[in-house]
Image (tube, rainbow, N blue to C red):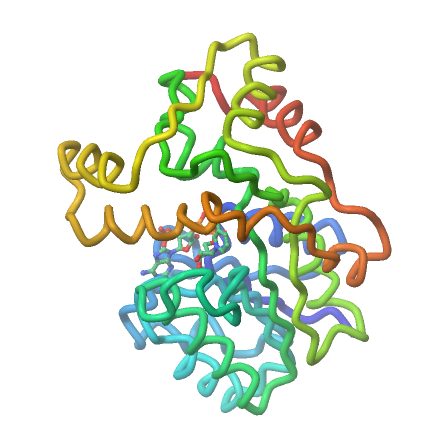
């Protein structure tokens, strides 16, 4: 594929930032779009969409959880001649009982996948499980710094996927042939319980981090006490339930299918995150 501009929606985030870096390393002209990026793009302000989409050959799309905006965005992309779309979705959207399909996140991904599949632009869908980077840049970082991961994950394990792998798959799908019409299920190469993940981070960083299993009710009550809206706290508990129920322990082969190599291991992620100072308070 000839390298024209490639749009990265959500290009300042965990996956988008890495996608943008990977594209630049390949010599692509990258257009990073977000509310805080040079190309100001706001999902909630459609007046900002055309400037982001105009003249790009392909786009990586991190959707806005809780909204149903991927469909009109994909339609607009088709109208403006975008040649391919790579959509970030999530593991389990097609698995009954994995999560609540009526939850804000569930609805975003179910509708978003349907939108790109039924649209006019060649597409690739990425379905990652829990990101390893949740521990270093996302939901779990504060808990790691506080030394206690308090979650309703029971003794369940998750096959955490490295966001570097998600980005590598996205870059391949954006720049190479052979990925159109594919849905890649992405995970790491092994499943770890929260206690094991905490132990790995402790071993590499020298910080004492322990996992404290909570019941879903205890977890929701703690979050509400910290000021979370009850509905958001319940949704968070529901998402973590997939780990407790053992639905996140399986290994997916999307990294190998897309890239012809194994997925990165959690230990490598921990070393890299520690090296880059992710857990410096
Ligand atoms: N974390 C996980 O374990 C996991 C697992 C599976 C799937 N997912 C899915 O991954 C997605 C999140 O991806 P990520 O972690 O790479 O993103 P992220 O780190 O949460 O970053 C979000 C990006 O979107 C931008 N953004 C946020 N609100 C926006 C708005 N209203 N308009 C325009 N841009 C906006 C942010 O930049 P600005 O704030 O500057 O706008 C940022 O660039 C979600 O859809 C989630 O469901 C996550």
In terms of image quadrants, where is residue 35?
Answer: bottom left
Q: Position of residue 192 (x, y in %)?
A: 60, 34
Report whether 126 appears left or right of 34. right
Reply above or below: 96 against 206. Answer: below
Q: Residue at x 80, y 62 (%)?
A: 257
Residue 26 or residue 269, whichever sits in front? 269
The N terminus, quarter of image: bottom right
Q: Name the residue at 51% across, 76% down.
A: 113
| Residue drawn at the location 61% of the way across and 21% of the way down | 200
* Outermost residue to the right: 260
Depth check, front residue: 188 or 64: 188
Residues 46 and 72: in front is: 72
Residue 63: % across, % down? 43, 65
Q: Is residue 127 above or below residue 222?
A: below
Image quarter where ligand 1 lies: bottom left
Pinpoint residue 69: horizontal percent, then vertical percent: 36, 75
260 vs 217, left or right, is: right
> Along the horizontal axis of the image, is 227 left or right of 263?
left
Q: Vertically, is 263 above or below 74?
A: above
Q: Position of residue 131 (x, y in %)?
A: 54, 44
Q: How many marks?
A: 0
């Amino acid at each position: 594929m000839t390298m024209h501009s490639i749009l990265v929606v959500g290009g300042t985030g965990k996956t988008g930032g890495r996608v943008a870096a990977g594209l630049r390393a390949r010599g692509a002209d990258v257009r990073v779009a977000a509310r805080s990026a040079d190309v100001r793009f706001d999902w909630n302000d459609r007046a900002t969409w055309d400037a982001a989409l105009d003249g790009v050959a392909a786009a990586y799309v991190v959707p806005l959880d809780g909204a149903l905006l991927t469909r009109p965005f994909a339609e607009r992309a088709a109208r403006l001649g975008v040649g391919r779309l790579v959509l970030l979705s999530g593991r389990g959207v097609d698995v009954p009982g994995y999560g609540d399909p009526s939850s804000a996140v569930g609805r975003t991904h179910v509708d978003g996948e349907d939108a790109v599949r039924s649209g006019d632009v060649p597409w690739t869908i990425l379905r990652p499980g829990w990101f390893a980077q949740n521990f270093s840049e996302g939901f779990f970082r504060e808990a790691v710094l506080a030394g206690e991961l308090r979650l309703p994950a029971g003794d369940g394990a998750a096959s955490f996927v490295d966001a570097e792998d998600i980005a590598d798959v996205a870059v391949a799908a954006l720049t190479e042939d052979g990925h159109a019409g594919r849905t890649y299920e992405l995970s790491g190469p092994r499943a770890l319980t929260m206690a094991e993940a905490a132990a790995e981070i402790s071993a590499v960083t020298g910080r004492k981090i322990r996992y404290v299993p909570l019941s879903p009710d205890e977890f929701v009550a703690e979050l509400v006490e910290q000021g979370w809206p009850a509905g958001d706290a319940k949704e968070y508990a529901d998402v973590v339930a997939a780990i407790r129920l053992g639905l996140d322990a399986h290994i997916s082969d999307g990294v190998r299918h897309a890239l012809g190599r194994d997925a990165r291991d959690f230990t490598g992620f921990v070393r890299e995150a520690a090296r880059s100072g992710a857990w410096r308070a």
